[in-house]
Amino acid sequence: MNRQNVTLSLPKTLLRKAKMMAAGEGKSLSQFLKESLEQRVRRGSNYNRARARQLGLMEKGLSLGTKGHVSVTREDLHVRH
């Protein structure tokens, strides 16, 4: 896998906490950040696929089993007793 170095500017407190978390997991800061970015990118990608799938379903519509015929009127549904 090709790699590219990047330079980050982070608040010192955030960097310190990230280093402590990485050490707690037995990882280098680089590995910790790489895995964190991978998770975030994967979540974003999964969200976009799910969103597209749901929009497609909404556009197509779902069968309600009525075959286009509704036997109950709106008034019947909203009768107050």
Image: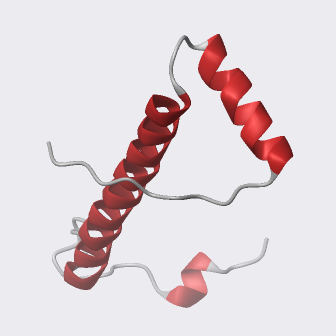
Answer left or right for 54 relative to 67.
Answer: right
Q: Quadrant of residue 76?
A: bottom right
Residue 46, relative to residue 70: is it above or below? above
Where does residue 65 sit, x and y in percent of width and height?
22, 65
Residue drawn at (19%, 80%) of the image? 60
Q: Nearer the viewer, residue 43 or 75?
A: 43
Where does residue 67 sit, x and y in percent of width and height?
16, 76
Q: How is the image coloured?
A: secondary structure
Answer left or right for 26 relative to 58.
Answer: right
The C terminus lies in quadrant? bottom right
Q: Quadrant of residue 26?
A: top right
Residue drawn at (46%, 50%) of the image? 40
Residue drawn at (41%, 51%) of the image? 43
Residue 3, relative to residue 60: is it above or below? above
Residue drawn at (39%, 54%) of the image? 41
Q: Nearer the viewer, residue 40 or 78?
A: 40
